[in-house]
Amino acid sequence: MTRSVASLVARARAGDARSVARLISLVEDGSPALGEVAAAFAPFAGQAQVVGLTGAPGVGKSTTTNELVRALRAAGRRVGVLAVDPASPFSGGAILGDRIRMQEHAGDPGVYIRSMSTRGQLGGLAAATPQAVRVLEGAGCDVILVETVGVGQAEVEIAQLADTTLVLLAPGMGDAIQAVKAGILEIADVFVINKADRPGADHTYRDIQGMLALGERAPGEWRPQVVRAVAVRREGIDEVVAAIDKHRHWLTDSGALRTGREQRAAVEVEAIALGTLRARMGSLRDGTPLSALAARVARGELDPYAAAEELLKTL
Ligand code: GDP
């Protein structure tokens, strides 16, 4: 291992916030040192509870995350927060940006807060986020909150890397119906109906409960919890923490923690491998195996399946 990476890792392990930040920047930039960083943190895998938090813009994710950090700190737990910008081609990639309002935790050595964009990373969010989680885990976080805006694929990817997934909804946004459409019912372990001070919150609550009642569950399977909260008034936050802990116990007791993490590792390895493959294949630039094969396919000399087989052989 190069000395600079080794000393960064050592300092991060000792709780140095700046080293943690630098390591996450390496992840974000898709640095060539990533392999070394991942190797250094591998032994600490699985020590933290990873909680994903997603929902449409404006439902109260930042506010809720902030309050969850407060509650977890009060319970003496070390907390990492990753606000992941999914860098969607539709959003231009600046949905979360630096707008996390968690200044009150800025001076607390038991909290790491970081927003992260994944534009530089091969394999995007799916490849980069788990590496950042590993850094926070290695730095001694007990709980890592991964916050992302619910836009399409991003929330499914968050669910894949989290032990527990919270989906935030707010009344009056047609969210319950949208949740079904977006397949959110399948990914949520805990629903938080935030803005329960607003009209329509009971309606949203009943909608979700009703939909959950329709779903078939095998005996012993987890039934998603539904919690009402008013994050701006700190109401319902302890209940959210309790639901997260309840899910954690279920994960451990049922064996789902292990299988879930194996699945997560598979997704992670696959994303890295696909990113590497894509990089090795090259683009359409002259001289890459891909460009030569593409020219033959375009001229009708070769079919695309045979070309793909040949391409894989060159890698
Ligand atoms: P995000 O976009 O999902 O991160 O949402 P924010 O946390 O930025 O919250 C969006 C807006 O909703 C802000 O103006 C918050 O103050 C407000 N908000 C958050 N939680 C509540 C709540 O429980 N009740 C009400 N009435 N407003 C809230």
Image (tube, helix red, strand yellow):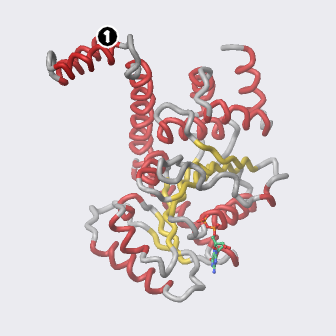
- Give 70 or 124, whichever is nearer the viewer: 124
Q: Position of residue 186 (x, y in %)?
A: 35, 60
* Residue 109 higher or lower than 27, as above or below: below
Picture quadrant of residue 105 = bottom right
**Above or below — where is 288 with respect to 241?**
above
Q: Nearer the viewer, residue 127 or 137?
A: 127
Q: Is residue 107 left or right of residue 216?
A: right
Question: Left or right: 190 with respect to 62?
Answer: left
Mark 1 vs ligand 1: CB below 8 Å: no
Total numbered circles: 1
Q: Determine the residue positioned at 54% across, 77% down.
A: 228
**Pick the front one: 112 or 239:** 112
Quarter occupied by residue 229: bottom right
Q: Residue at x 60, y 44 (%)?
A: 48
Rendered location of residue 1, percent (x, y): 66, 14
> Residue 309 at what x, y percent from top left?
22, 18
Q: Name the residue tied to disc 1.
A: 314
Is 9 situated above or below 119?
above
Image position of 299 (left or right of 160) = left
Disc 1 crowd, CA 10 A, few/some/many (<14, 14-19, 20+): few
The quarter of the rendered structure image containing the C terminus is top left
Q: For mark 1, give the secondary structure.
A: helix
Looking at numbered disc 1 in the image, what kind of residue is underneath it? Thr
* Residue 4 visible at all: yes
Q: Which residue is outermost to the bottom?
A: 199
Rendered image quadrant of residue 304: top left
The answer to whether residue 252 is visible is: no
Ligand 1: quadrant of the figure:
bottom right
